[in-house]
Amino acid sequence: MGRQPCCDKLGVKRGPWTAEEDKKLMSFILTNGHCCWRAVPKLAGLLRCGKSCRLRWTNYLRPDLKRGLLTDAEEQLVIDLHAKLGNRWSKIAAKLPGRTDNEIKNHWNTHIKKKLIKMGIDPVTHEPLDRKQASPTTTSQSTVTADSKSGEATRQRSPQPDDVVVRDMSAGGNSPPESSTNTASTAGGSSSSSSSHHYQDPLVKWLLEEDLPTGADEPWLNFTAGNDADEFSSIAAAAPSLPWDAGVTDWLLDYQDFGMGDSSLLVDASMVNNSNGSNF
DNA sequence: AAACCGCGCAACCGCGATCTG
DNA sequence: ACAGATCGCGGTTGCGCGGTT
């Protein structure tokens, strides 16, 4: 009964993806889409399981991905959404176009969590760890820069977003619109920090108020016959932080060499632009 | 100069939800 | 209706790199 096994794990390659594997997967998905992840590795000629292919695609190869550190506005939005939603990274990521749940999760664990702790804020409940300890005026600015390491110091961190956090967290606040459906035990009871009017940043305010088109949109699945190679090139040029900028996947720049120049494979530029339309 | 340490990120794992036959 | 496959999510791990001692 039912379906075939997902993957038999025997002969399935694991570990870091090579440029060649990326090339195969990217080429395949841009050509055929990913209606069935189980079939993708076999059809693409990859010795990977479908799960691994999906992860690689969603976290690294998707054309609409942003790369690089989160901006202050994005970080602030993540903090607030986390206060509302808890560790529902996919929901949070859906509010940040071009960002993946994995990326946000990593950033939370490596940056934001520590930052909040240093500020005297419990990263789980978003409540002050110790109300006596939480002294925003003395901790926020000095500790924000303290966690910088390996390039973090180069980030242009403004103290203002942090000040907003402290103000919001200590202000209590009223019930967020989504709180009625929020069943997360950690954030649910204390998810009161985010009355959107607290945000001076209009972008953050807008993102919190609007039900955005999610970053999960997959415009590359909506290929149109009218697209051409020049259009694809313009998309790549317009997206300064696409993964292949790092040089690891330079092959993508030569997509015509392996058939991606075919008009049927190309991404609708307008849809890509829409997905990144918030211009962080 | 070498060893050690901490950080950041990519990838894996396991589980629950959903779908399919 | 049920069993099993598939998908998607969140937690965790492992490795490479850069900084420090």
Image: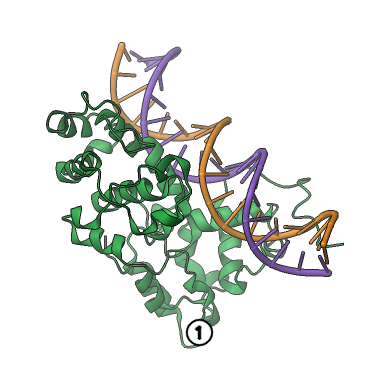
Chain colours: A green, B purple, C orange
Chain letter of disc 1 in the image = A
Q: Is residue A106 left or right of residue A280?
A: right
Residue at numbered disc 1:
A224
Instruction: Tell which of A198 and C10 is nearer to you.
Output: A198
Q: Tag 1: residue type?
A: Thr
Number of marks in the rendered image: 1
User: Is A204 above or below relative to A132?
Assistant: below
Residue A1 position in % (x across, y down): 87, 62
Residue A131 position in % (x across, y down): 23, 27
Residue A248 seen in render: no
Classify residue B21 by image quadrant: bottom right
Q: Is residue B9 left or right of residue A172?
A: right
Residue sitting at x 79%, y 55% = A5
User: Is A57 above or below relative to A131?
Assistant: below
Residue sitting at x 23%, y 36% = A153
Instruction: Tell which of C6 and A254 is nearer to you.
Output: C6
Give the secondary structure at mark 1.
loop
Residue farthest toward the left in the current orientation of the protein: A137
